[in-house]
């Protein structure tokens, strides 16, 4: 693990393609609201799915309060396939995030036809 990164710095990275943001919460929590362009890899599945991150130059882990994401970043950083990757945890987690959130639930509601009344 290469340390922690501030939520403001993560928000600055959203426009670029140089970081993969990994939200380690449950799929249900992720669907309710997540950082745009982040991907959901729940913490309990991370050991089996860490190989999916092997091609990333920079990985940022996110959780609700910034504690479990430190553990996730350590796990990712210990994987030999990410040895050359920069792996960071977002400081303070989503409670410290002031940026926009996407919601799968809201998108599904927005994509439907308009009600006739």
Image (cartoon, helix red, strand yellow):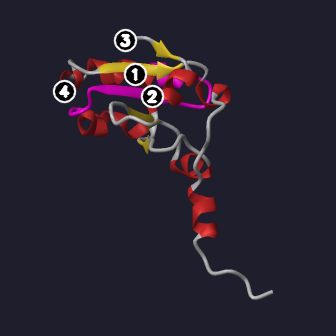
Residue 20: percent from left, percent from top? 37, 34
- Circle 4 — which element? helix
**Comes first in the chain, label 3 or label 4:** 3
Q: Residues within 10 Å of mark 4 (few under 14, many from 20)?
A: some
Residue tagged by mark 3?
A: 2
Quarter of the image with the N terminus is top left
Residue 5: say if magenta: no
- Which residue sits at x=30%, y=40%? 49
* Callout 1–callout 3 Cβ contact below 8 Å: yes
Q: Position of residue 28 (x, y in %)?
A: 57, 51
Name above or below for residue 14 compared with residue 115: above
Which residue in the protein does label 1 denote? 73
Identify the residue position indicated by label 2 in the image: 61
Extent of the magenta region: 54-70
Q: Is residue 56 magenta?
A: yes
Say what secondary structure mark 3 lies in. loop
């Amino acid at each position: 693990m290469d340390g922690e990164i501030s939520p403001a710095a993560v928000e600055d990275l959203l426009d670029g393609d140089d970081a993969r943001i990994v939200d380690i919460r449950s799929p249900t929590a992720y669907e309710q609201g997540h950082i745009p362009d982040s991907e959901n890899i729940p913490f309990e599945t991370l050991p089996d799915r860490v190989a999916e991150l092997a091609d990333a130059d920079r990985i940022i882990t996110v959780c609700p309060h910034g504690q479990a994401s430190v553990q996730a970043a350590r796990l990712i950083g210990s994987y030999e396939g990410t040895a050359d990757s920069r792996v960071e945890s977002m400081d303070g987690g989503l409670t410290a995030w002031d940026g926009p959130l996407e919601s799968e639930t809201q998108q599904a509601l927005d994509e439907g036809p308009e009600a006739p009344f």
